[in-house]
Amino acid sequence: MIALALLALLVHFARHAHRPLLWLPTGMLLGGALGNIIDRLRAGSVTDFVKLPLGWPPFNLADVAITLGVLALVLVLERPAGDRSRTPAP
């Protein structure tokens, strides 16, 4: 299932590579997913090594990359493809 999702992401990236900044969330999602897959193959489970105080659940950097990659992907996809208008400062 994970391989299918990664393949769909790569196909979407290849078909829309002209969109500015699409490579950034794609790389974050692929890197995070592959990091978790490598952990599962190597150790049998994902190693959570960042533990914050106050009861925050432990996580790893791959989880951070996936979460930020999803947020960045939404922002990139919501931005119109041809929106390159940056108003210069007066």
Image: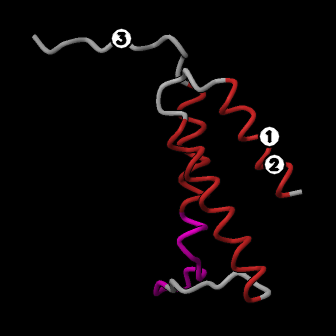
The residue carrying mark 3 is 85
Q: Amino acid at mark 3?
A: Ser
Crowding at label 3, few (<14), some or many (≥20) Cα neighbours within 10 Å? few
x 73%, y 41%: residue: 9
Q: Amino acid at mark 1?
A: Ala
The magenta region covers 52-64
| Mark 3 or mark 2: whose residue is earlier in sequence | 2
| Residue 22 to residue 86: above or below | below
Residue 5: which numbered mark, if any? 2
Q: Are marks 1 and 2 in contact (CB under 8 Å)?
A: yes
What number of labels is visible?
3
Q: Amino acid at mark 2?
A: Ala
| Residue 33 to residue 61: above or below | above
The residue carrying mark 1 is 8
Q: Is 66 in the magenta? A: no
Q: CA distance from mark 3 to mark 2?
A: 32 Å
